[in-house]
Image (cartoon, rainbow, N blue to C red):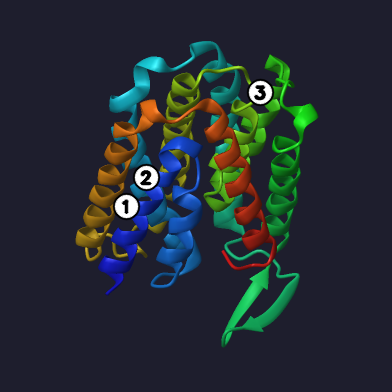
Amino acid sequence: MEIIVICVAAFFTAVLTFFSGFGLGTILTPVFAIFFPIDVAIALTGVVHFTNNLFKIALVGRNTDKAVLLRFGIPAIFASFAGAWLLLKITVLPTLLHYELWGKTFEVTPVKLMIALLLILFSILEITPSFQKVQFGKDKLVWGGVLSGFFGGLSGIQGAIRSAFLIKSGLSKEAYIATGVVIACLVDFTRLSVYATRFTSANLHENLMLLISATLSAIAGAYMGKRVLKKVTLRSIQLLVAVMLIFISLALGMGLI
């Protein structure tokens, strides 16, 4: 049953997130968490996320904006080390609030609440008409890389913050998608090197079939997304990013994911 649930989630999420540039790790992590401890779920999701992004690089990597990649990617790599190290030190952050819904107990942690507030701010700005002409300068990209890398290493949630900065950096839709994918791969490789100590406890060899199935499903979803890329406008991608930021930030803030 877990293979079916995770594969279906991986496929449809990969199609949707091909354009937004984020969401695969954010959505897959709680799905994996149904069957594994949260730190193990983050590590396993990282494997699927990294492999899927390698495939996406093969599809669109040639459109990467090298200047933005350096400005954003290098700070993200260093910050992801710090975030991943912190995750291993405090596997479960102190909980701010417990509540029950639908017969289940949900938790609101400081890190989830902080990310949620950041995302809701970006989403509100993204749908504000006066914000449409605003573009982030190169110095802002550095801070975006720090925030995205740190929270990516700490919680696996990096794409939403990354996309909120890159979508306003003046890139074409092709460059936006490609640059985001390459940055995501760099951060994934960094945090997976730190998470490696968790793979033994995850019984990786026993769950190899599940990981392979989930990865192939995500790759199939990414290929499907590439097929319809030319039919999608940059504005529609911006709106998709805004809507996903809102939903994910609300779910994070409520402790649902």
Q: Which residue is pictured at 56% across the width and 17% down the height?
A: 68
Q: What amino acid is at disc 1?
A: Phe
Residue in the foreground of this view, choosing between 250 and 105: 250
Find the distance from the CA under tag 3 to the CA under tag 1. Answer: 30 Å
Do residues under tags 2 and 1 come within 8 Å of each other at their CB atoms? yes
Query: Quarter of the image containing the C terminus?
Result: bottom right
Could you tell me the amino acid type at mark 3? Leu
Q: Check whether the beta carbons of the residues at disc 3 and disc 1 lie within 8 A of each other.
A: no
Single out the residue that lies furthest toward the right.
130
From what the image shows, is residue 56 above or below residue 85? above
Q: Tell me the crowding category of disc 2: few under 14, some 14 to 19, or many 20 or more residues within 10 angstroms, Cα based.
A: many
Q: Which residue is mark 1?
A: 11
- Counting the numbered discs, the total is 3
Give the amino acid at mark 2: Val
* Earlier-in-chain disc, 3 versus 1: 1
Identify the residue position indicated by label 3 in the image: 141
User: Residue 39, image x and y in percent?
Assistant: 49, 61
Q: CA distance from mark 2 to mark 1?
A: 6 Å
Q: Nearer the viewer, residue 83 or 22?
A: 22
